Every structure is written in C-alpha cells, then in structure tokens.
Amino acid sequence: WSPDVTDIYGLTPLFWAGYKGHKDCVEILLSRGADPLYERTQSNRNLVGLSYGVSSDDSPLAAATKCHHGDIVAMMQDIIKARLSVASAGVCQGCQQLTSEVRSLSAVVAKKDEQIHLLETTVNDMKEVVTANGRQISFLSKAWANVKRFFGARDEQFHHVVPSVDQLSSCAVESPGSSLSASELQSSVTDVQILEVAKAAGDKWSEIGVYLGFKFTDMKDYEVKHRDSLSERLVEVLTDWRRKERNATVGILLSACKKAGVEGAATNALRQ
C-alpha cells in the first residue's frame, strides 16, 4: 500500500505520527517512502482542535516542527537530505530541466536570493561532474517539485528546507580537498577497494549504505545476516550496490563515506 494514504481529512499517517511525537512510527513510515512534505488537497474537510497552532493544511514536517518534536524533525530532514543526495549522485542529463525548476523557484521565493544563487551554482557544478541516469533524473525532478510546492505554500517554513537543499552542494563527484585525482574519482570501484573501505568504515557501515540509496530495512537485513562482522556487512552492501548501480564510481562511494564522517579513512582505502 501507499504510505501516504489519507484519512477523511486528507491527512497521512506520517502527519499524525509527527504531530503525536511517535518516533518509532515515523521511522517505519519514512523507511517505507512516506513524504515529509505531503500536503492535502483543498477539497478535504477541515479538522479543528489541533494543538500548538498546527493546521490540517500543514505538512508532516511542519506539524512536527510546531509541536517541538526536535528528534522527529531531524529525522525527517535527514531523510529528505538522503533522498536528494542519492538521486543527485548519478545525474547529468536533465540538468537543463533542473535549472528551469530552479528559475521557477526563484519567482516564488524572490526574497531568498542568496539561497537561489546557491541552487543555480550547484546545478551548474553538477553538469561537469555527474553522469546520466534516467531513473535518478526522474526521482530528483520529483524531489525538486516537492521542494518548490513546499516553498510556495509555506514560505514561513523556508528555513526548515534550506538545510536539505544545501546538501545538494555535496553531490559533486570530486569534492574540494580530495587527494584523489579526477580520473581516480571517475573510475569504477574494484574488489580490493570494497574490502579496504569495509575495513576502514567500522560502525559507519550502515550510514554509508543509506547514503548509497539503501533503506533502513535493508540495513537491518545485512546486520542479521552478518551479526559478528561489521566489515562483512559493508562488503555485501557495496557489492550489491556495484551490481545494481550502472555508475558505481569511486567518487560516488567517497561522497557517501564523506557524509558518514569517514572521508579520511575512505580516501586512503580508495587509493588501493
């Protein structure tokens, strides 16, 4: 079923879980693909009596924010960042379409010139360093549409989304300060590099997997399968990622390691 199924008021399970502060429910719904920025249609009934100034027109992220559920807000923002980062990792064709989306966004949030400039600069950088992947282009276009819709309807909540959008600046394959050359970053990941990264990552193995596009439930499966070895978990994660991903490059893997906080160790491992 769809995780964004709605009740008679047009509200999703994620809205109610975020409003009530049920962190475990929020984590499960996000792992199933629930949308933190979902907004109901104007044709739904209005629900009155909500606390903390929450409106039935609010998104799940807005409801959790108004109720001061900081851990849930952080979880929703993290999943937005992860989805945008994964989607942008292998994108090249479609950058022109994204630039058009950014320009449309500029008209909606004209007062936010500094943030718009950052988005346009990021898209231009993406043209030089990422490769085409039609499925990921479609995913990222949908994500930008959601961001655009969120800005248009909830301008006062702009600061909640900016951290998520800013993460796009890290989608470049060759990050500043990397000691690997451009040719090394664009090369395919080898078996030896997988083994060395798995040894270096330690307990960050699951974060690397999430940043490479795996779900939280996938990480649980790998953990159960390899209970006694962190490195064996990551070896299987990276092997599956390389098999499924057409563009499994050193640069994309290094970007995921950087987000997980093990850039230095990963850089040394990827020199193999």
Image (tube, rainbow, N blue to C red):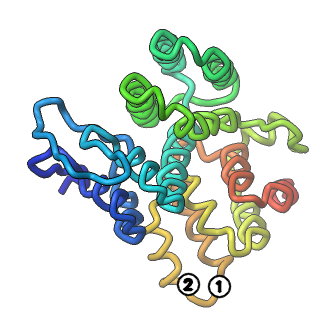
Q: Secondary structure at mark 1?
A: loop
Which residue in the structure is indicated by mark 2?
226
Give the class, few, some or many, for how many residues have Cα within 10 Å of label 1's Cα (few <14, many ≥20). few
Residue at 71%, 37% in the rendered image: 173
Horizontal side of 6 relative to 77 (left or right) equals: left
Q: What type is the residue that disc 2 sits on?
A: His
Q: Are marks 1 and 2 in contact (CB under 8 Å)?
A: yes
Can you give x and y, in whole percent of width and height, for residue 149 in the image? 37, 26
State the separation of the CA atoms marked 1 and 2: 6 Å
Residue nearest the viewer, comparing 106 with 168? 106
Which residue in the structure is indicated by mark 1?
229
Label count reads 2
Q: What type is the residue that disc 1 sits on?
A: Ser
Horizontal side of 136 relative to 196 (left or right) equals: left
Can you give x and y, in whole percent of width and height, for residue 55 in the image? 29, 42
Can you give x and y, in whole percent of width and height, for residue 228 in the image? 62, 90
